[in-house]
Image: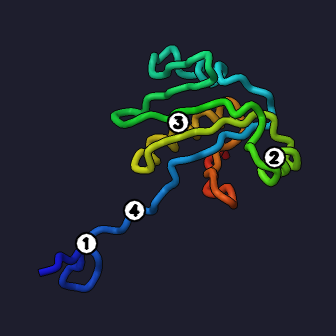
Amino acid sequence: MARSNLKKNGKTSKKPAAKMPGEWLYLNKEELPLRKIYELFNEAQNAEHWEAGVLEISLPESGTLDMEDLEGTLGDDEGDAYLLQNGIHTVFAATIRPEDYEKAKEIMFFITKKLGGYFCADTADFKPVVAAK
């Protein structure tokens, strides 16, 4: 017999989790080196920075938020036009496991609160967005 997640009252037993993207961008109008983000975390010793332009931030009891310097470009004309139109000078790729989104979101919010800018999904409409209010 096929398994069902329906309860007797017809409602699902679990609310389906929204599928969050694993590929993100960190965009900032200021010119920031990746080392500046590393310095926010190195006292707690939960981040590793490689001179090759990669930063790995450990998430509490979870995976990592990995960031890579894209050197001010998204690599395509349409994306780079968006950067130019919005005065964006810092572009980092950020990668998470989608199931780690809630913990990664806390780290993304912390970074934007301290350094400005915003995280956005690496999607056609750059949504969802995570930024300090």
Judge whether 57 appears above or below 25 on screen: above
> What's under tag 2, amino acid-wise?
Asp
Q: Reading the chain from its start, which is encountered first: label 2 or label 3?
A: 2
Give the labeled residue for mark 3: 107
- For residue 80, which numbered disc appears in the image? 2
Alpha-carbon neighbours of circle 4 within 10 Å: few (<14), some, or many (≥20)? few
Q: Secondary structure at mark 1?
A: loop
Q: Nearer the viewer, mark 2 or mark 3?
A: 2
What residue is at 58 percent from the left and 32 percent from the top? 67
What residue is at 56 percent from the left and 25 percent from the top? 55
Q: Reading the chain from its start, which is encountered first: label 3 or label 1?
A: 1
Instruction: Tell me residue 42's x, y (percent).
Output: 52, 16
- Colour logic: rainbow
Give the labeled residue for mark 1: 13
Instruction: Tell me residue 80's x, y (percent).
Output: 81, 46
Q: Quadrant of residue 12?
A: bottom left
Q: Are marks 2 and 3 in contact (CB under 8 Å)?
A: no
Quadrant showing the N terminus: bottom left
Q: Secondary structure at mark 3?
A: helix
- Could you tell me how far apart the alpha carbons at marks 2 and 3 are, in whole angstroms? 26 Å
128 left or right of 103 in image: right
Q: Are marks 2 and 4 in contact (CB under 8 Å)?
A: no
Give the labeled residue for mark 4: 17
Judge whether 95 appears above or below 34 on screen: below
